[in-house]
């Protein structure tokens, strides 16, 4: 359980505070409700660009990292399709350093032509190194484009093309900042050995006077139901062929989410899981295999993927996946098998709650979902999944006409 206090400041900033008596560190997390799903199709990669720009200094603090280091702290950030997250840990006595820095860059970011030019080069090089010049680098980009035709999930957080970043003007970038980086679009969450009322008061002190500049929300186009199987095959200079099959599933708040997550663990949660045991160890069709869900805020994907051994054809791998899906749809999962997965999730949850950063991040994430208390109910939600719900989910989800298959063939 993560006990917490919640408050919304007059400018719209949501604040959550958790008292942790066991840690000497404070964790400060600020989540902005902006990710790749909020971008214009002609101007993608901006949320990720801002992950970089937010460390380039403000009008008041030229070097963001220096005060963090002087306060014996550590900080970083990440961007995905749904949100951007900035986090910091430092001694609890220095928590105000973190609040000062975060309140400063929420409205005082200094975006100059020189800083923008530098970060554009960094982001474009990252795109090339991670996605274009690395084995299997563009595999996820191809799968997104195959599985989505309308929704912004059809591009990754890095963007559709590096050209969008290269062509971004100073006005484009400043407008994106004004639209998305302001108090009412942010969630501040903290965990420390400090009374919760004190943390809320400190949030008021550092953030309460900031002006808000809310923008009208831009509607996000929703993906229409998929009614025909999709397929794409590419050839790349990689050591082994891979086969990936994706199926649409509900979003993070869907009633199906916990069932889907449990099914993915049944299939590939370790060396004793179904896919590894049957397709890697017993049948020797694949060298590696995985099944996972994307866990997106909007409807996401359930993905099967495997790397083929030299003697295995893509057709054999696809047939093996179909056989495993048929088993899911016909034969109820064993109680022992399900309990093992449920126990693993509960253990991971309890272990994660020992860490102040995990608690601060989780509070921010679940608040973004619209229900911070969900962080304390998820163990029960997984526990409620039954063999019948797995059968029902599998029959509705893993239908051939809803599949998107990517054959990533080695030359």
Image (cartoon, helix red, strand yellow):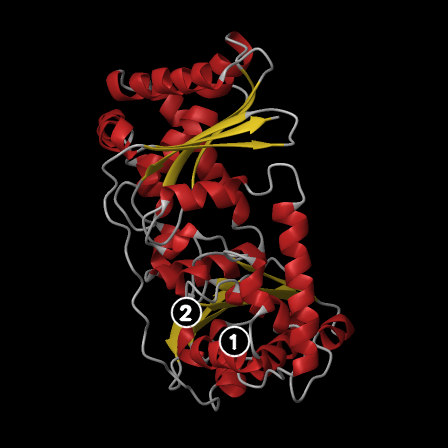
Residue 290 x, y percent position in the rendering: 49, 29
Give the label on residue 199, or none.
Answer: 1
The residue at 55%/21% (across/down) is 271
C-alpha separation, residue under disc 1 versus residue under disc 2: 9 Å
Give the label on residue 81, or none.
Answer: none
Residue 95 x, y percent position in the rendering: 63, 74
Mark 2 crowdedness (10 Å alpha carbons): few <14, some 14-19, many ≥20 = some
Height in image: 152 above or below 352? below
- Secondary structure at badge 1 equals helix
Height in image: 218 above or below 214? above
Observer-nearest of 260 and 385 = 260
Rendering quarter of residue 192: bottom right
**Residue denoted by label 2:** 5
Mark 1 crowdedness (10 Å alpha carbons): few <14, some 14-19, many ≥20 = many
Residue 109 x, y percent position in the rendering: 60, 82
Q: Is residue 194 left or right of residue 340?
A: right
Of mark 1 and mark 2, the one earlier in the sequence is 2
> Can you see residue 366?
yes
Residue 197 x, y percent position in the rendering: 47, 77
The residue at 50%/64% (across/down) is 84
Height in image: 214 above or below 187? below
Rendering quarter of residue 245: top left
Observer-nearest of 336 and 142 = 142
Count of marks, rendered view: 2
> Can you see residue 94?
no
Mark 1 and mark 2 in contact? Answer it, CB < 8 Å.
Answer: yes
């Amino acid at each position: 359980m993560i006990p917490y206090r919640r408050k919304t400041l007059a400018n719209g900033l949501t604040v959550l505070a958790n008292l942790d008596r066991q840690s000497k560190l404070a964790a400060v997390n600020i989540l902005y409700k902006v990710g790749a799903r909020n971008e214009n199709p002609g101007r993608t990669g901006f949320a990720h660009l801002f992950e970089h720009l937010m460390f380039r200094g403000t009008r008041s603090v030229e070097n963001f990292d220096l005060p963090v280091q002087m306060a014996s702290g550590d900080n970083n950030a990440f961007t995905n399709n749904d949100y951007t997250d900035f986090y910091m840990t430092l001694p609890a006595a220095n928590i105000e350093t973190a609040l000062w820095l975060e309140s400063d860059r929420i409205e005082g970011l200094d975006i100059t032509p020189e800083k923008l030019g530098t970060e554009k080069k960094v982001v474009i090089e990252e795109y090339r190194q991670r996605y274009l010049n690395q084995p299997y680098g563009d595999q996820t980009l191809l799968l997104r484009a195959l599985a989505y035709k309308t929704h912004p999930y059809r591009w990754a957080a890095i963007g559709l093309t590096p050209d969008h970043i290269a062509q971004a003007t100073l006005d484009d970038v400043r407008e994106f900042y004004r639209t998305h980086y302001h108090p009412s679009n942010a969630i501040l969450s903290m965990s420390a050995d400090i009374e919760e009322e004190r943390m809320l008061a400190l949030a008021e002190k550092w953030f309460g006077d900031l002006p808000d500049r809310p923008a009208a929300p831009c509607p996000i186009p929703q993906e229409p139901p998929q009614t025909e199987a999709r397929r794409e095959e590419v050839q790349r200079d990689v050591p082994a062929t891979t086969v990936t099959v994706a199926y649409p599933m509900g979003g993070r708040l869907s009633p199906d989410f916990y069932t889907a997550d449990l099914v993915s663990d049944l299939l590939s949660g370790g060396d004793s899981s179904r896919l590894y045991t049957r397709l890697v160890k017993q049948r020797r069709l694949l060298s590696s295999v995985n099944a996972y869900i994307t866990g997106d805020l909007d409807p996401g994907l359930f993905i099967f993927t495997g790397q083929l051994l030299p003697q295995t054809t893509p057709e054999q791998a696809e047939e093996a996946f179909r056989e495993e899906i048929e088993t899911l749809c016909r034969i109820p999962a064993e109680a022992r098998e399900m309990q093992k997965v449920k126990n693993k999730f509960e253990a991971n949850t309890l272990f994660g709650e020992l860490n102040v950063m995990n608690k601060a991040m989780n509070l921010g994430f679940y608040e973004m979902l619209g229900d911070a208390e969900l962080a304390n109910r998820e163990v029960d939600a997984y526990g409620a999944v039954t063999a019948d719900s797995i059968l029902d989910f599998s029959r509705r989800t893993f239908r051939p006409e809803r599949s998107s298959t990517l054959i990533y063939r080695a030359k």
